[in-house]
Amino acid sequence: MATTTMLRQWVTANVFCLVGTSPLKLLAWMVSYSQCTEVLRDLIDKFYCSIYRHDRCGFDNVKQRLHTFAASGGNTDMFWDNVKHAQKPEAVVLSHDPLGSVTLRAQSANKLEPLRAALAEVQRHRSAIARNDALFLRKCLLKLAIDRASQISQCGFDGRLCWDDEFVADRGSAIIEGSDAECTEQWWCTESPQCVRHQG
């Protein structure tokens, strides 16, 4: 009992003076404190002063406030939608450079993080589209080579099938459309159909 009285005196003298609680709130806290039968929690948790003696006291208080809100005609579903994704506020770091400008690093970082994630997603989509385009161009080149090889009596191996992706992306569409100005025969093997180099 003496420990509880000493703890109340310490709380009255120190914690509530730091927080700036009014005397009426302090009196209400002390009255409700005398009725609480829960185990006392830490009063100071990383420089955060709690007005509740135990977590359940805080839950009971929130429950009572929600019942009062609902009884006064408040829409609890809309309330839950608004607070469902609430996050604990992060500290704001102010840095001062020699020129005198002040930046809010935490806020700008919080704003940039979703944008960076969206940019990464766009880059993934862009690379997937580029891969699909390269595959489509290679498929068209292969079809052209097969069609031409079946119509001529030569080996007909098309060296353009060995191009890397960058070269296919640069020149592939021009070849498929037939607008390539270069002589296309320089890419074909003109040996006999049983060419040792390509058939062997």
Image (tube, grey):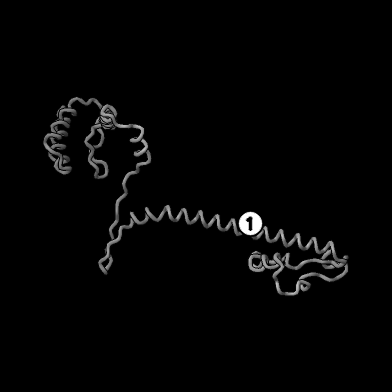
**Quarter in which the C terminus is drawn:** bottom right
Residue 147: give x, y in percent of width and height: 80, 61
The residue at 59%/56% (across/down) is 128
Q: Nearer the viewer, residue 86 or 186?
A: 186
Q: Is residue 98 left or right of residue 117?
A: left
Residue 110: give x, y in percent of width and height: 37, 53
Residue 42: give x, y in percent of width and height: 25, 37
**Quarter in which the N terminus is drawn:** top left
Q: Nearer the viewer, residue 119 or 40?
A: 119
Say which quarter of the image contains residue 99: bottom left
10 Å crowding of disc 1: few (<14), some (14-19), many (20+): few
Q: Nearer the viewer, residue 96 or 158?
A: 158
The residue at 41%/54% (across/down) is 113
Say which quarter of the image contains residue 82: top left
Question: Which residue position is annotated with label 1?
Answer: 132
Q: Is residue 60 visible?
A: no
Q: Nearer the viewer, residue 28 or 116?
A: 116
Residue 169: give x, y in percent of width and height: 64, 65
Q: Amino acid at mark 1?
A: Asn
